[in-house]
Image: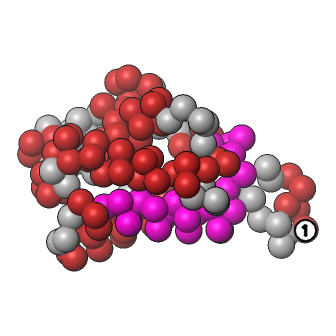
Amino acid sequence: MSKPMANDTPASKSPLVERLGGEAGIRRWVDRFYDAVPEDPVLAPLFPEDLTVSREKQSAYFLEFFGGPPAYSQTFGRPFMRYLHRNVKIGQAERDAWMEGMMAALRAEQNDAELLEAVAERLGPMATQMINHHPARKDSYFFN
């Protein structure tokens, strides 16, 4: 399970949010990721054609997830991410493609190896938790 979201610190006071460039830096990172999604053969089928809302939600979620203000919760409600993605078939390949896309987008924005490692350590468990499709398991029929 991923670490709980720390949202009691203003974005300007969250060390991780600051290192990511604040709200604007997170938005650039998320936009870079979503700019690449339509061309990714694994990720593109998982997302709607219009990525506007996806960009908004991901930016707000990351701001909150990395220690900034509760931007996602205040706008969209509680972030029950696994539940919200229940209709999206996410297996290991989709999880790995998402992680690689997020980290590639961040590497294009940041060259701080320590920051990249810290972000990967936070995102990895959360991405793994999103897996809801297990085709090798006998009970995979019950997953998307």
Residue at the spot 54% in from the left edge and 43% down from the top edge: 81
The mark total stands at: 1
22 falls in the magenta region: no
Q: Position of residue 20 (x, y in %)?
A: 19, 55
Residue at the spot 9% in from the left edge and 45% down from the top edge: 13
91 falls in the magenta region: yes
| Residue most extreme to the left | 13
Q: Which residues are magenta?
A: 85-106
Residue at the spot 65% in from the left edge and 68% down from the top edge: 92
Residue 131: name its quadrant.
bottom right
Q: Position of residue 110 (x, y in %)?
A: 21, 64
Q: Is residue 131 visible?
A: no
Secondary structure predominantly adopted by residues drawn in magenta: helix
Q: Is residue 64 visible?
A: yes
The 10 Å Cα crowd at callout 1, few under 14, some 14 to 19, many 20 or more, is few
Q: Position of residue 3 (x, y in %)?
A: 38, 57
Amino acid at circle 1: Lys
Q: In the shown orientation, is residue 83 left or right of residue 139?
A: left
Residue of label 1:
138
Vertical comparison of 12 with 119: above or below? above
Q: In the shown orientation, is residue 130 left or right of residue 105?
A: right
Vertical comparison of 138 with 74: above or below? below
Disc 1 element: helix
| Residue most extreme to the front | 39
The one nearer the camera, 18 or 6, is 18
